[in-house]
Image: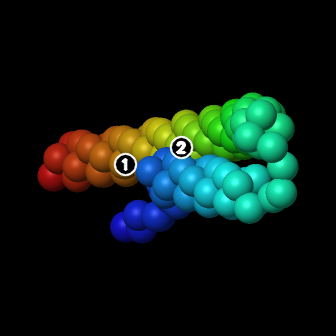
Amino acid sequence: MFTKKKVPEIHSTNIFSVLAGILVGSLAGAVTMLLLAPKSGQDTRKRIMERGIELRDRTTGMVEDTMKQVRLKTDEITSGGRQKARELLEQGQALVVEQLDQVSEAAQAGKKAIEAS
């Protein structure tokens, strides 16, 4: 009677895998770039530290944005589920009232048939 609607699932492990890949790739690229640059050791270490801090800040921002999106999607799915539950409850109540009316009508018809005989 009712069809089951598939709700898109949020795969947080995929999101974190992508973020980890971006982090590792960015870090590897930054370190390679800095190590191949013709600078002194002290300058290179300073640049590595600065890039690491910058990368950490960007990654933190990306994780925060992703978590906000996950929370919003979760809220949407939850409120949609609640709305659907309310609709189903109303439909169920309407069906119960309809069936009670039919039973009442049948009982009245049976009572009249018994009285007539």
Q: Which residue is pictured at 62% across the width and 57% down the height?
A: 28
Q: Residue flagged by tag 2: what amino acid is it?
A: Gly
Q: Residue flagged by tag 1: what amino acid is it?
A: Gln
Q: Which residue is mark 1?
A: 99
Q: Which residue is pictured at 84% across the width and 49% down the height?
A: 39
Observer-nearest residue: 111 or 79? 79
Mark 1 vs mark 2: in front: 2
Tag 2's secondary structure? helix
Residue most extreme to the front: 40
Q: Position of residue 53 (x, y in %)?
A: 75, 32
Q: How is the image coloured?
A: rainbow
Q: Which residue is mark 2?
A: 81
**Label placed on residue 72:** none
Neighbour tally class for label 2: few under 14, some 14-19, many 20 plus, Cα within 10 Å:
few
Q: Position of residue 96 (x, y in %)?
A: 39, 42
Q: Which residue is pictured at 74% across the width and 61% down the height?
A: 36
Q: Which residue is pictured at 83% across the width and 57% down the height?
A: 38
Sequence-wise first label, 1 or 2: 2
